[in-house]
Image (tube, rainbow, N blue to C red):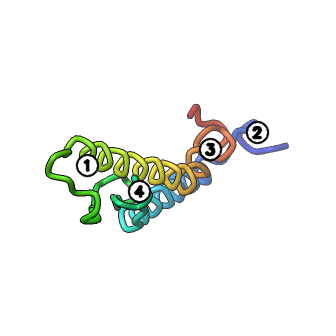
Amino acid sequence: MIPGGGQPNMQQLLQQAQKMQQDLANAQAELGRTEVEGQAGGGLVKATVNGSGELRGLVIDPKAVDPEDTETLADLIVAAVQAANDNAQKLQQQKLGPLAQGLGGSGIPGLPF
């Protein structure tokens, strides 16, 4: 017979939860250090963001600069930043996805996440 009527060991559950919390914190810290790039206009504008989506750099090729048409340059910048953020979201899913799935019932039985 299983002690406690077959209930999961609370100490073991707490240890698993603490480990998952530490793994999540480590993954988030890694995302903050990891940089991804997005570009627009065939590479005329390149944006760099960290894995959390924070803009870290912007490179504009002089060929993209037309004083008579700043709207196109603005559009290219927005598109490059969006592409970089899309890449950051993919990285987040890659790094945090397995941890979130672990919280979804398969990682710690008995917890309603």
Quadrant location of the C terminus in the rendered image: top right
Q: Nearer the viewer, mark 4 or mark 2?
A: 4
Residue 7 falls left or right of residue 101:
right
User: Does the residue at mark 4 contact the one at mark 1 (Cβ under 8 Å)?
Assistant: no
State which quadrant residue 60 falls in: bottom left
Which SS class for mark 4? strand
- In the displayed structure, 62 sits above or below 72; it is below
Q: Nearer the viewer, mark 2 or mark 3?
A: 3
Give the Cα separation between the discs numbered 3 and 1. Answer: 41 Å
Report the residue at 65% width, 38% height from top: 105
* Disc 4 residue crowd, few under 14, some 14–19, many 20+, Cα 10 Å: many
Q: Residue 106 versus residue 111: which sits nearer the camera?
A: 106
- Residue to which mark 2 is pinned: 6
Q: Kindly identify which numbered label has been placed on residue 73.
A: 1
Which SS class for mark 1? helix
| Residue 36: % across, % down | 43, 62
- Residue to which mark 4 is pinned: 39
Give the Cα separation between the discs numbered 4 and 3. Answer: 31 Å
| Residue 30: % across, % down | 43, 66
- Residue to which mark 3 is pinned: 101
| Residue 80: % across, % down | 37, 51
Report the residue at 71% width, 40% height from top: 4
Report the residue at 41% width, 67% height from top: 34
Is tag 2's residue or tag 3's residue first in the polypeptide sequence? Answer: 2
Which SS class for mark 2? helix
